Image: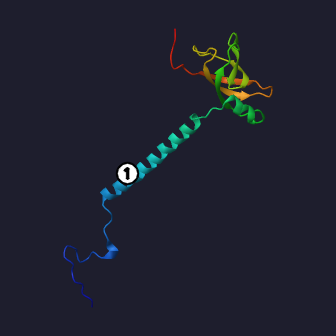
């Protein structure tokens, strides 16, 4: 027969095989920790997904002309200045030339034109380059000048 020597502070019936279950507080802490980690990961994913779709780089006229955007038909953001003397309006239809250094490109836009749109202003147009070399813009953004003059 085997006798066990009792350890102070422990009951004689408690052995390594019958450990008490973790307390409710510890389980709650683990649940909160796991839930917090999942929430942080989900928020991080949403921020990255939203930033990736809205943080779009725009190309210059010369970069667009050197690329294969016509063949692919993919949407492009194009930036440059409105060429002096190139603006033609007819109702909601607008045609102008966008210039970047020596490269120019005709742009066609139908829609609401920003109030500050004029010759020489920097613009960003979103759309597609058509096979005939005209840029069909679906969106027109005009950059505000650093100084307003009256």
- The residue lying at 37 percent from left, 51 percent from top is 32
Q: Residue furthest front?
A: 102
As drawn, which residue projects farthest toward the left? 8
The residue depicted at 66 percent of the width and 28 percent of the height is 78
Identify the residue at the far right of this view. 132
- Answer with the quarter of the image where residue 18 lies: bottom left
Q: Which residue is mark 1?
A: 32
The quarter of the rendered structure image containing the N terminus is bottom left
Residue count near mark 1 (Cα–Cα under 10 Å), binned few <14, some 14–19, many ≥20: few
Q: On the image, which quarter does residue 127 sit in?
A: top right
Which one is nearer the viewer's eye here, 88 or 19?
Answer: 88
Question: In this rendering, would 123 be left or right of 128?
Answer: left
Picture coordinates of residue 12 (x, y %)? 23, 78
Of the pair 26 and 125, the residue shown nearer to us: 125
* Among the 4 quarters of the image, the one containing residue 86: top right
Q: On the rendered structure, is 115 left or right of 127?
A: left
Left or right position of 145 against 86? left
Query: Residue drawn at (80%, 28%), measured in percent from left and top?
Result: 131
Front residue of 5/44: it is 44
Please provide percent x and percent y for residue 147: 50, 17
């Amino acid at each position: 027969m085997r006798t066990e020597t009792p350890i102070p502070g422990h009951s004689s019936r408690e052995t390594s095989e019958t450990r008490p279950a973790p307390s409710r507080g510890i389980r709650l802490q683990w649940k909160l920790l796991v839930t917090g980690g999942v929430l942080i990961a989900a928020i991080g994913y949403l921020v990255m997904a939203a930033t990736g779709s809205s943080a779009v780089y725009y190309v210059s006229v010369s970069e667009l002309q050197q690329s294969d955007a016509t063949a692919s038909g993919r949407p492009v953001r194009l930036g440059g200045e409105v060429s002096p003397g190139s603006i033609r309006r007819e109702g909601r239809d607008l045609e102008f030339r966008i210039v970047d250094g020596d490269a120019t490109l005709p742009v066609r836009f139908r829609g609401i034109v920003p109030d500050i749109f004029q010759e020489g202003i920097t613009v960003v147009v979103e759309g597609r380059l058509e096979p005939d070399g005209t840029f069909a813009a679906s969106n027109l953004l005009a950059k505000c000048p650093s100084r307003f003059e009256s």
